[in-house]
Every structure is written in C-alpha cells, then in structure tokens.
Image (cartoon, rainbow, N blue to C red):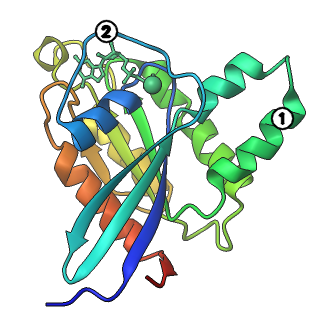
Amino acid sequence: MSVRRRTLLKVIVLGDSGVGKTSLMNQYVHKKFSQQYKATIGADFVTKELQIDDRLVTLQVGFEFKSVFNIWDTAGQERFQSLGVAFYRGADCCVLVYDVNLMRSFDTLDNWHDEFLKQASPPDAKTFPFILLGNKIDIDGGNSRVVSEKKAKDWCASKGNIPYFETSAKEDYNVDAAFFCIAKTALANEHEQDM
Ligand code: GDP
Ligand code: MG
C-alpha cells in the first residue's frame, strides 16, 4: 500500500492552568506521567504521526499558550496578540480540557470556547470542531469529583454536540481513544499538504 499524501493536522489544546494539558500530551506522545507540576512557559508544540485508514497523518498539537498570556499580560500585549494569532491560525480542531474535580475549570469552558473562536476566526464558527476532555477522573476513586458526566454532556449538547471523553492522564485512561477521535475530527476539517 502506498501512502501518497501526508496530512498535517493542527490541533490546539486549551483549558485552565493545572487541568492536565501537558500531562495528557506526555501520556499520549511519550507514554509518561509525572506527578510534579511544572507550569509551561510559552507555547508548546508536539507532533505525533498516526495512520487513519490509508492516510498518514501528522498531528501537530499546540497547548499552553495561555500561560504566556498570563505572564506577559501586563508586559507586552502587542507581542501577545501577534503570537496569539499565529498560535491559533489554521487549527483543524480545538480540544478543551477541564478537571472533573474543579468546578472553576468547568465554568471557564465558555471563555476558552469563545476565545478560541475569536483568535482563530475560522470560516464557519458554528461548525468548527471542538472536543471536550474531563480529566483527572482517577482522583480519590471519583469521590472528589464535582462535575457530573451529565452536566458535561449537557454543556456539549448546548454547543452543538461536541464529543466528550473522560480521561486520566495519570492512569492512561481513554487518552488514546480521545486523541484518535481528535485526529479523525481534525481530518474531516483538514488542511492538506502535498508531499
Ligand atoms: P496543565 O497546566 O494543564 O498543563 O497541567 P499539568 O499537565 O501540568 O498537570 C497539573 C498537575 O496535575 C500535575 O501535578 C499533574 O501531575 C497532575 N495531573 C494531570 N493529569 C492528571 C490526572 O489525570 N490524574 C491525576 N491524579 N493528576 C493529574
Ligand atoms: Mg502545562
């Protein structure tokens, strides 16, 4: 079987600081998890190759831009704005992450959703693909969770049936499945590149 085209898909991961964006990426790409928290400074990008049917796909996943925003907010807004647009531009899918044990991280989802649409300004905001991940479901065996699956799914329904996955970056639960769905969704909204 020959693969003629390489498809580059750009995915942006957003969510409050500490919800597990870096950990999900580390688990997905490197199969590693660390309990230690290190705030990401700057925009991080990782790539991962995968095959979907007969297509060779390179996922380019960007996350953590907001950390820069927070830190540089007062220092240099113009710099942020130009960087910001480059970070979001051309995205094929946006992944929103919250922590099921932290209501605030769920409450801010609307802001992340709106901010993405504002910055990326995709041609059709109504149909642009998002995916929601509820992370850290392993904590305390689920006893400390404050956002129910139903509440999360209701939010997804209100945004036009966004796919929803509950994940644990720590226990590698549902991480592959979530990113496979992300890749497929992004592929349906692709920007193709000839090899
Ligand atoms: P980010 O700021 O969104 O990138 O969050 P990080 O990936 O840096 O994670 C923040 C903290 O939460 C770190 O201490 C991680 O070890 C921890 N963490 C991330 N994902 C999980 C998870 O699924 N389960 C548990 N128990 N801890 C997690
Ligand atoms: Mg991080």
- Viewer-closest of 153 and 186: 186
Q: Secondary structure at mark 2?
A: loop
- Disc 1 beta carbon < 8 A from ligand 2? no
Q: Amino acid at mark 2?
A: Gln
- Identify the residue position indicated by label 2 in the image: 36
Residues marked 1 and 2 touching at CB (< 8 Å):
no
User: Residue 162 appears at what percent x and percent y?
Assistant: 40, 57
Mark with earlier residue (1, 2): 2
Q: Amino acid at mark 1?
A: Arg
- Disc 2 beta carbon < 8 A from ligand 1? yes
Image quadrant where one finds the N terminus: bottom left
Specify the farthest residue to the front.
Answer: 195
- Identify the residue position indicated by label 1 in the image: 79
Q: Residue at x 59, y 39 (%)?
A: 112
User: Residue 26 appears at what percent x and percent y?
Assistant: 29, 33
User: Residue 97 appears at what percent x and percent y?
Assistant: 41, 37
